[in-house]
Amino acid sequence: MEPDDSTIVPFSSIENAQEYLALLLETIGVVKEAVENDTYLLGPGSEGEASLRVLQIVRYSLKKLEHHIKLSHRILNDLRTLRRLLDQKSSVQLPVVAAEVAIPALMCEYSEVTK
């Protein structure tokens, strides 16, 4: 069954997922800026000490989220590259060596980032 034009599938392709992540990164940047402004407005003082601690946790969580979204974006780029290699393979025989080099390199990069 073919989806009609009114049906929106947000992750129907790697490119759509990358677009979503780009929007998410943009939103994270806006929120980080708002948190920084709130932190500045509170300033040091005993009344806002608890709020400052909460804002520090929010900043830390946003930083972690931003890192994971950037990592996900890189993984999607890698998947897109691998898809292109597979598409090329259907028309031109790629050497097996390319896959033997690319896949372990990707796995090494992923394991280093997730440590």
Image (cartoon, helix red, strand yellow):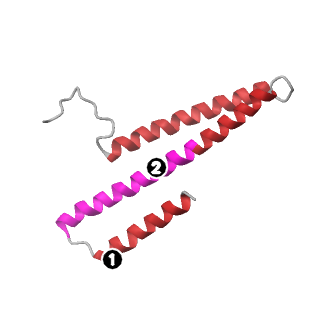
**Dot 1: within a 10 Å radius of its alpha carbon, few (fewer than 14), some, or many (20 or more) residues?**
few
| Picture coordinates of residue 61, whole percent (x, y) | 62, 40
Residue shown at the point (35%, 59%) measured from the top left: 81
Residue shown at the point (41%, 38%) measured from the top left: 20
Quadrant position of the C terminus in the picture: bottom right
Residue projecting furthest to the top: 47
Residue 8 to residue 69: above or below: above
Magenta: main secondary structure: helix
Residue projecting furthest to the right: 46
| Picture coordinates of residue 71, whole percent (x, y) | 50, 51
Residue shown at the point (18%, 33%) measured from the top left: 3
Question: From mark 1 to mark 2, how far is it between C-alphas?
Answer: 26 Å
Residue named by callout 2: 72
Residue shown at the point (53%, 33%) measured from the top left: 27
| Side of 90 where 98 appears, left or right | right
Magenta segment: 65-92
| Picture coordinates of residue 67, whole percent (x, y) | 56, 48
**Which mark identifies residue 56?**
none
| Picture coordinates of residue 50, whole percent (x, y) | 78, 28
Residue named by callout 1: 97
Inspect the image, locate mark 2, and give the three-letter code of the amino acid beneath it: Ser
On whether residue 108 falls in the magenta region, the answer is: no
At mark 2, the secondary structure is helix
Any part of residue 114 in sight: yes
Quadrant position of the N terminus in the picture: top left
Q: Quadrant of residue 62?
A: top right
Inspect the image, locate mark 1, and give the three-letter code of the amino acid beneath it: Val
Residue 100 to residue 57: above or below: below
Indicate which disc, 1 or 2, sits on the residue closer to the N terminus.
2
On whether residue 80 falls in the magenta region, the answer is: yes
**Dot 2: within a 10 Å radius of its alpha carbon, few (fewer than 14), some, or many (20 or more) residues?**
some
